[in-house]
Image: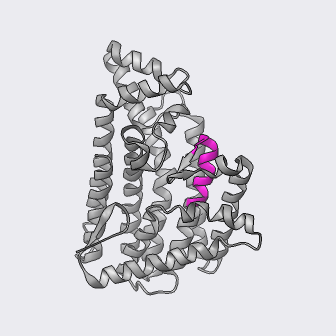
Amino acid sequence: MTVVGPFGLSVRDQALEADVQAGMTAVEEGLIEATKSEVPFITGAAQHLVRAGGKRFRPLLVMLAAQFGDPYAPGVVPSAVVVELTHLATLYHDDVMDEADVRRGVDSANTRWGNSVAVLTGDFLFARASHILADLGPEAVRVQAEAFERLVTGQILETAGPQDGRDPVDHYLDVLGGKTGSLVAVSCRFGAMMSGADETVVDVLTQYGERLGVAFQLADDVLDIASDTHESGKTPGTDLREGIATLPVLRLRERAARMGLPEDVALCELLDSDLTDDARHAEALRLLRAHPALEQARRDTVRYAEEARAVLAPLRACEAKAALVELCDAVVHRAG
């Protein structure tokens, strides 16, 4: 049994391990190549987060999904580079919107070079992803375009907030389906599609990726409250400080509206105050970490991971399927 990929994924089959490791190495090389520019400053900015590391969660899913067809097909590795470049580009933009100071344990690009350079670097990565995508054929371009539209729509919906009468939790889960689920689903879709897997297999893996992506983001929501910087590579409570209501906060507000407990109402009022104040921010984190709303958010994470696991049922038994099942457990483990 060998540990590879994010979260210490265990691969028990030597052939699968070799395929995954070779694929991930090729993706890493592809990312470095795709982020080179004739302008050294652009290369440095574009490779800032690539060289900072990361879980490479989406490329790993491409490699595992490709096992249901020909994992050596020429489009597999380039499609994995495309999804990771797209993901990296969104991180540059997210950090500007969130005014984040830290990403993957290093200074965020906006902290180091300013917002304009960070946004333009994200655009540069989108352009490079599109260049690679063009060689993968019109269907790949269409799939990526649809996913990118969903991703941006999710971001806009998050910014706009729920319409009057819409349940905030339902709205938020829809946002996550767009912001995170769409690109994780495409990772699975590209791996299966580029490997020549049957269309039914492609559909199953796409549905799996959608649910796993939401579970993955919900686990991040929990980590943003529960972890320290060393564990997550990001500043804890970044979303709190920016007034972004992630699932633990939404579950708190839901409980406060339903039960009206004074301590819940008081915590909601604290969260609605100016959390750029370090003392208020620290107190909000401390109270949320001990609140039942955080445990409810963990249960929501488990639910989506279990749905992802159930979707895999029609697939033939194999080591790749076992690894995808284990990823469901690994995502839940991240949330504690």
Residue ID at (33%, 55%): 331
Residue 94 in magenta stretch? yes
* Residue sitting at the far right: 39
Q: Main secondary structure of the magenta part?
A: helix
**Colour scheme shown:** one colour
Residue 178 visible at all: yes
Residue 333 in magenta stretch? no
Q: Nearer the viewer, residue 288 or 47?
A: 47
Residue 135 is left or right of residue 173, and the answer is right
Q: Position of residue 58 (x, y in %)?
A: 45, 65
In the image, residue 246 above or below residue 309: above
Residue ID at (58%, 63%): 86
Q: Nearer the viewer, residue 112 or 241?
A: 112
Q: Quadrant where the N terminus lies?
A: bottom left
Residue ID at (36%, 67%): 204
Residue 248 is left or right of residue 329, and the answer is right
Magenta-highlighted residues: 88-101
Residue ID at (61%, 64%): 145
Q: Position of residue 31 (x, y in %)?
A: 57, 72
In the image, residue 265 above or below residue 47: above
In the image, residue 200 above or below residue 175: below
Q: Nearer the viewer, residue 194 or 101?
A: 101
Residue 197 visible at all: no
In the image, residue 323 above or below residue 167: below
* Residue sitting at the far top: 262
Q: Position of residue 260 (x, y in %)?
A: 34, 15
